[in-house]
C-alpha cells in the first residue's frame, strides 16, 4: 500500500513515466544513482532530473561518495517516507477543499449549457450573451448539476478513505523511527560506558605504575637545580679575585710617579 501512495506522489510531481522509481527508492539504504538509471533504462541525466524535481519538495535525501580511482562524486538516494506521507496528506486536504468549494458553488448558483457545443457558462456570463451561444446560435438550457454534485461527493469519500490510510502509514513510520532512535540511543550509551571504563582502567594502571616505580617528582626537580647553583657561585668567586688584583696594581703606579717628581724638585 505504501508503494501505491508513493507512486501517487511521484506522478503528481513528475508524471506517470517516473512512477517506476518508487520501488527503487523505497528502501532503508541509499541507492546509487547509476543503478537507478540502469534499472529504469534511462540516462543518468534523465534520472537526475527526476530526482531533483522530487528533491525540490524535500521528499528524498542523498549522500555523496568520492570515487578513489576516478576522483568524481557519486550520489546515493532514498525516500524520506514520513515527509512523503505528510506531503500526500496536505495534497489530499487541498484537493478535498477544492472539491468542497465546487460542490458549494454548484448548490448555490445556476449554470447554463449549450447542448450542441457542450459549453458551460455561469449565470452572469450567460446573461451578457443573452442566453444564446455565440458559436452555433442555439439558446442555452439550465445545467442539471445534481449528477455532478454526487460525483464530487463520491470523490470526497475516496479522499477521506485515502487520508485514513495515509494516517495509518504515518503512524507506522513514526513507530519505526522511534525504535531506530531508541536503538541508536542504546548503542551510544554502550559506547559511552565502554569509553568511561577504558579511561577508568587507564587511570588505575597509571596509579599502579607510579607506585611500583616509586617516582618522587619533587626530588627529581631539586637535584639539577642544586648543581647549577654551585657552578654559578664558584665562577663568581674567581671573577672577584681577578678584579681585585687589577685594582691594586693600578693604585701602585701613580705613587711611584709622585716620588719621582719630588726627587726632581729637590
Image (tube, rainbow, N blue to C red):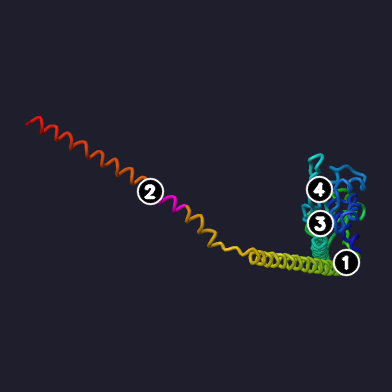
- Provide the residue span drawn in magenta: 228-234
Q: Place residue 84 in its image quadrant.
A: bottom right
Find disc 3 in the rendering and name its residue. Answer: 126
Please name the residue shown 91% across and 45% down the image: 38
- Secondary structure, mark 2, is helix
In the displayed orientation, state which residue is furthest to the left.
266
Whole-angstrom CA distance, mark 2 to mark 3, is 123 Å
Looking at the image, which is closer to me, 188 or 183? 188
Comparing labels 1 and 3, the label whose residue is closer to the camera: 1
Find disc 4 in the rendering and name its residue. Answer: 75
Find disc 2 in the rendering and name its residue. Answer: 236
The verdict on residue 259 being magenta is no
The answer to whether mark 1 and mark 3 are in CB contact below 8 A is no
Is residue 96 shown to the viewer in this render? yes
Find disc 1 in the rendering and name its residue. Answer: 162
Q: Is residue 224 above or below residue 161?
A: above
Amino acid at each position: 500500500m505504501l508503494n501505491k501512495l508513493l507512486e501517487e506522489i511521484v506522478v503528481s510531481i513528475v508524471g506517470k513515466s517516473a512512477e517506476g522509481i518508487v520501488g527503487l527508492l523505497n528502501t532503508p539504504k541509499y541507492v546509487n544513482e547509476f543503478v537507478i538509471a540502469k534499472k529504469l533504462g534511462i540516462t543518468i541525466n534523465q534520472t537526475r532530473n527526476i530526482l531533483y524535481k522530487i528533491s525540490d519538495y524535500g521528499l528524498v535525501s542523498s549522500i555523496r561518495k568520492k570515487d578513489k580511482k576516478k576522483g568524481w562524486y557519486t550520489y546515493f538516494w532514498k525516500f524520506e517516507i514520513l515527509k512523503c506521507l505528510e506531503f500526500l496528506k496536505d495534497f489530499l486536504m487541498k484537493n478535498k477543499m477544492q472539491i468542497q468549494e465546487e460542490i458549494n458553488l454548484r448548490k448555490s448558483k445556476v449554470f447554463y449549457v449549450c447542448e450542441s457545443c457542450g459549453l458551460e457558462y455561469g449565470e452572469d456570463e450567460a446573461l451578457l450573451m443573452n442566453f444564446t451561444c455565440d458559436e452555433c446560435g442555439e439558446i442555452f438550457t439550465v445545467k442539471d448539476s445534481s449528477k455532478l454534485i454526487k460525483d464530487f461527493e463520491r470523490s470526497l469519500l475516496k479522499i477521506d478513505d485515502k487520508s485514513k490510510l495515509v494516517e495509518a502509514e504515518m503512524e507506522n513510520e513514526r513507530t519505526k523511527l522511534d525504535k531506530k532512535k531508541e536503538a541508536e540511543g542504546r548503542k551510544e550509551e554502550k559506547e559511552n560506558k565502554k569509553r568511561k571504563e577504558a579511561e577508568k582502567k587507564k587511570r588505575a594502571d597509571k596509579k599502579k605504575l607510579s607506585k611500583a616505580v616509586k617516582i618522587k617528582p619533587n626530588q627529581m626537580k631539586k637535584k639539577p637545580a642544586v648543581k647549577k647553583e654551585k657552578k654559578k657561585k664558584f665562577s663568581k668567586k674567581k671573577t672577584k679575585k681577578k678584579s681585585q688584583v687589577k685594582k691594586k696594581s693600578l693604585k701602585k703606579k701613580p705613587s711611584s710617579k709622585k716620588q719621582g717628581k719630588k726627587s726632581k724638585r729637590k
